[in-house]
Amino acid sequence: RLLQVSKNYRSVIRACMEDMHQAATSTRDPALHSQYSTQVSILSAMELIWNLCEILFVEAAGAGPLLLRLLDWVRLHVCDVDSMVREVMSSENPAKHELFWNVVDIFVLQGRMDEARHLLSKEASANPTSVNMYKILDDLMKKMPVPGLGNTQTLTEMELKWQHWHEECQRYLQDGTFASNSHMESICKILLGDDDAILEKKELITTWYHFLVTRLLYSHPTVKPMELRMDLFLGRESSPESLDTILMAAFEFEMHQVIKECSIALSNWWFVAHLTDLLDHCKLLQSHNLYFGSNMREFLLLEYASGLFSHHSLWQLGVDYFDHCPEYGRVYLELHIERIPLNTEQKALKVLRICEQRQMHEQVRSICKIMAMKALRNNRLGSALSWSIRAKDAAFATLISDRFLKDYSERGCFSDLDLIDNLGPSMLLSDRLTFLGKYREFHRLYGEKRFSEAAKLLLLLMTAHIAPCSFWMTLLTDALPLLEQKEVIFSAEQTYELMRCLEDLTAGKSDKQKFQDDVETMKVEMLRLALARNLARVIVKEGTLEGS
Amino acid sequence: VMEDVCAKFVSQKISKTRWRPLPAAALQPPDLFATGSWDNEDNRISIWSVGHLGNVGLDGVYQGEPQLLCDIRHNGDVMDMQFLDQERIVVASSTGTVTIFRHHQNNQTLSANQRWEKAHYHVDQDTCCGGAACTGIICNNPEIVTVGEDGRINLFKADQKDAVRTIDNADSSTLHAVTFLRTTEILTVNSIGQLKIWDLRQQRNEPSQILSLTGDRVPLHCVDRHPNQQHIVATGGQDGMLSIWDIRQGTMPVSLLNAHEAEMWEVHFHPSSPDHLFTCSEDGSLWHWNTSTDIAEKPSFLHQGGRSATYLPHNTSNQSIVSAWLSNDPTKDRMEITNLILNQTLSVNSLDVLGQCLVYGTDAEAIYVNRQLFA
């Protein structure tokens, strides 16, 4: 299953390569073209490395099949062969083509025996004198034991067979069977695993890793990769490129080295993060903790995901990555999610949903508060309230209610009645909000001339301490018109209550304060008068016997 | 059927997908749709073609993934989008601008035809006139109504520079969507769970009717009117709840259906088979609600043998529809609800249905087309 995952990764890389290649060939801008082409080569290097890691680490093929996989790997990544082959095969007389022997050689070097033999047969038919040589060579090639091809023989059996075959080849060479044809002779030497013979074909092989695999094929097909002798191929002058170092580390099964070198060589964390994650799932990375606590896989994933968060739209993917980092993922997410710019309400809602799904209550509150403040600044009181309801933020709801009440005090009427009239159960979010709703209800009742109900509500607002003290004066002033009505509305008891409220209100003030505010004093006087008058009327009314 | 869904990865998060409307007497299925993206530095409006008449596969199903015909840069997130007619698309932007784009069929290009900058804006106390996102659009050629985060309603006419009418502060909260009830009446939904009906003939800037959810004032994000019954309206909420309303009766929803686990972004009645409803959500699912009275009897769409012409029957039996949506009880076997998405990942932001075809777009940067909805 993990092998399938690895293959999927590689097909993704290849798909990107395709797209890049398309873009490169279709663009007319030379700068863009070179940019795209660079990308293509980077992607192809990535696929090369990943493929090798897949063979060596994920699949971890045993000694026999390992070689086959490596051969496949080499065949896949040396593309020049195909064009050469096509050229030769499509010519009228392939055997006479100047590249003929090159193609045969490369087939042999890559262990593609059938194809080599097929080509050789053309040479044989064209050149009757070498028929004998050809038959022997062909026979040798046919008989070559290939490891792990679905056979059930053990490694030892295989090794024995191979030994016999090797000796046979040796005999033919020493007999001078191929002496007259240098091409065929060199092929025989290659079959024997002769380093010099293989090295002669340097231009065809092009890369040291191809050389390595070819050597393995013809000297020790059943053994794990030997020590590298790269210097043989390159010569002492040239120093290894980063790709070479990475591949070398892979061949030596130094996984951590591979990861380290890739991190240095590649500018983006995508490759190492995903490769490390895969290797980790294969249980190949020893969890030696880095000194700040998390393991390498988590470290790389965190780095990669943090990078995603700085992208304008890929932050959503980053969330998933953090989810899969058991130790520090949540902390990182908490820090990053608050920094996403929220330019529309819809985006804020998406971010909030992510937070709520992970029980990140702190972040929910803070984001809602930011949105609510923004709404308040833009005078969108309904929106602000909607955000505080989402966060269940009672304090903010109180703030908004105070804002409404302030507006009312200044203008004498309510703004946004559609909101206040339709608060519903959200009214209970904060006391101030409840008061606002009820106060508006009082005004509605008054407007509908349901005076006794209005009066009762008004009194309730004060006695049940729903109204803030700062508003009592306003409430009492609202009571004035009710007191002045022709019909008596407040009962005696209610009037006493009102009086008490008024006294409570004025008692707190010092003498100095009382004299300073003329309007206030006048209001208080008027109230006292109205209350007294009402009391008088109501006592009379209640004292009068009904129906007499 | 799942196999008929065609996916295309487009490297941009899709916020809106819309089929180009078919001309009145059209016989063929829809073949062209538009998409809008969001959250990119460079957002785009794109036109896609899907299925060519010659490209018929084995069982008469049109093969092939959507092909990009043309696209054009759009400033800001695409918040809403609707075809005004066969060539013009109206697009709402997060910058508060409303643009009409024209699709030139002869050379397959898009151009901006008309633009109303600052159709929606905030009057900030500190700075002046910051843009406010335009959240919803509805068209009835040539009229265009837009609503936004500034609580404003605009009535535009295509080719007319100034707004025909503007209702400032129509709502103290954000208006999320708008739809026409009649040619002179619109309905808006807002973020404190209210539906407001506005009579455009009247000059006063007050709604003629207000309906609201019982219980918590959950924000409403989308609305759609029944194609034949003008008094039936469906809304989707932030909690994923689907509500069906009868405008004539009372101020509360007729039914509440617990649907998605997160915000419902769009709700659509099927235009020619309105006993089918489709909703999509932030939770990554797309639901098909089927209240056909007889589930076994599917609406008689085409594809009984390949290339015969499409006919879209109009449901004349309104009675069954009325009873289906208004007096529904999901526990009875009358309603069949199916999630059309197998591998749920990121949010499905938008969907559109026309005839047998469904198109939807996701935050996973993909577009999906299903051309055999009622197979």
Image: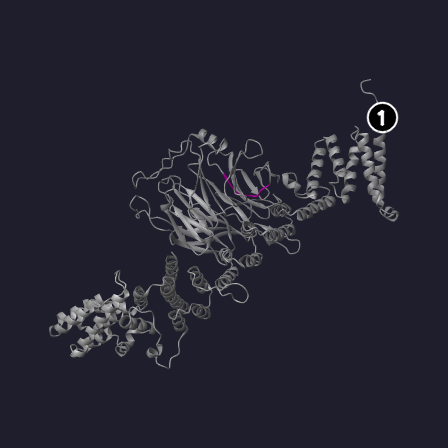
Q: Is residue A61 above or below residue A358?
A: below
Query: How dense is the environment of label 1, judged by Cα within 10 Å: few (below 14), some, or many (20 and up)?
Result: few
Image position, residue B311 (x, y; %): 36, 37
Image position, residue A140 (x, y; %): 19, 70
The magenta stretch spans which residues? Answer: B217-224
Image position, residue A92 (x, y; %): 17, 68
Q: Is residue B17 above or below residue A225?
A: above
Colour scheme shown: one colour
Image position, residue A292 (x, y; %): 55, 66
Residue at 21%, 71% in the rendered image: A164
* Residue reaching furthest to the top: A548
B325 and B346: which is toward the camera: B346
Query: Is residue A422 in view from this perspective?
Result: no
Locate the N terminus of chain A by quadrant: bottom left
Query: Is residue B230 in view from this perspective?
Result: yes
- Chain to which mark 1 belongs: A
Locate the C terminus of chain A by quadrant: top right
Does the magenta portion include B221? Answer: yes
A474 and B228: which is toward the camera: A474
Q: Amino acid at mark 1?
A: Val
What secondary structure is found at the residue carrying circle 1?
Answer: helix
Q: Main secondary structure of the magenta part?
A: strand
Residue beneath disc 1: A540
Total number of numbered discs in the rendering = 1
- B336 left or right of A425? left
* Residue reaching furthest to the left: A128
Does the magenta portion include A337? Answer: no
A497 and A437: which is toward the camera: A497
